[in-house]
Amino acid sequence: MTERRFSVTRDGAVATVGLAGPGGKPVMDEAFFVEMGATFAELDADDDVRAIVVTGAGSHFSFGLDLASAARSFAALREATHAGARKEFLASIRRWQAAFDVLAGTRTPTVAAITGWCIGGGVDLAVACDVRVASADAVFSIREAKVGIVADLGSLQRLVGVIGDGHLRELALTGDDIDAARAAEIGLVNHVHASADDARAAAADLAGRMAANSPLVLQGIKDVLDAERGPRVEAGLRYTAVWNAAFLVSDDLEEAMAAFAERRPPEFTGR
């Protein structure tokens, strides 16, 4: 049996989705993206589910992309000399983006309960939810700049309407870590709670209050709020996918992967 990347539990009208990766690690591999779209599409189609809570399966929310697995794909792409390889890579990025689009586009309200590390793709996932709450130990980072990648799964597009352009540029261009208090200050999370258990309980309570309202009205609210954002986000995602398909494979990316494996700071050259 294939190892599951998501667990789903239900408490009345609220479903809780727990995230995990290979071996229970909080990373995103190819199987994660495939199962992600299917999981949230199934829940969104269930009329008995009126709100969804998204949590990490363990103490951390997500470390983002499985870099060890991604490094092998990047190496194969660098060695390819034909356009077909880049077209395939573009298709992969668009497929991964589509999984996040399923979550972001649900008619069902979603609440992310963020504990521990929320890094790279973890931020993309959190911001694809409607509302975010965090535990005091949560740490956030749009880490991609530090590993030679333009973030391409939605944070650069969706965070504009959440934290504003200036804060987004600071986080994306530095790749710095910020704590839960700073995340709340800039609006990345709505509430901060003392512990992981408190954060998860608060997320479930918030989802329950949403679920008590008319599903038709909730869908209408999300449709209205997304009317402007949807086309802008899609245009940005498409552009980012094309950019990375053309420019992601570079000396800097190779250096970033080597530095990651050797646990040292990278030395970038811009080539």
Image (cartoon, helix red, strand yellow):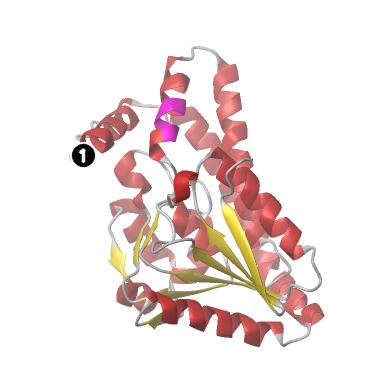
Q: Does the magenta stretch include residue 71?
A: yes
- Height in image: 193 above or below 164? below
Residue at image position (73%, 57%) is 41
Q: Which of 225 and 47 is in front in this view?
A: 47
Q: Does the magenta stretch include residue 196?
A: no
Q: Is 160 situated left or right of 177 in this image?
A: right
* Residue segment shown in magenta: 69-73
Give how far across and how far down residue 93 sits, in percent: 57, 38
Residue at image position (75%, 58%) is 42
Give how far across and how far down residue 92 sits, in percent: 59, 34
- What SS does tag 1 mark? loop
Give how far across and how far down residue 178 sits, in percent: 29, 66
Image quadrant where residue 265 sits: top left
Give how far across and how far down residue 57 sits, in percent: 48, 61
Residue at image position (44%, 33%) is 69
The quadrant of the picture occupied by the N terminus is top right
Evaluate whether residue 139 shows in this view.
yes
Residue type at tag 1: Arg
Image quadrant where residue 119 sits: bottom left
The quadrant of the picture occupied by the C terminus is top left
- Height in image: 128 above or below 241? below
Q: Which residue has dot 1 on it? A: 263
Residue at image position (73%, 79%) is 218
Evaluate whether residue 231 shows in this view.
no
Image quadrant where residue 186 sits: bottom left
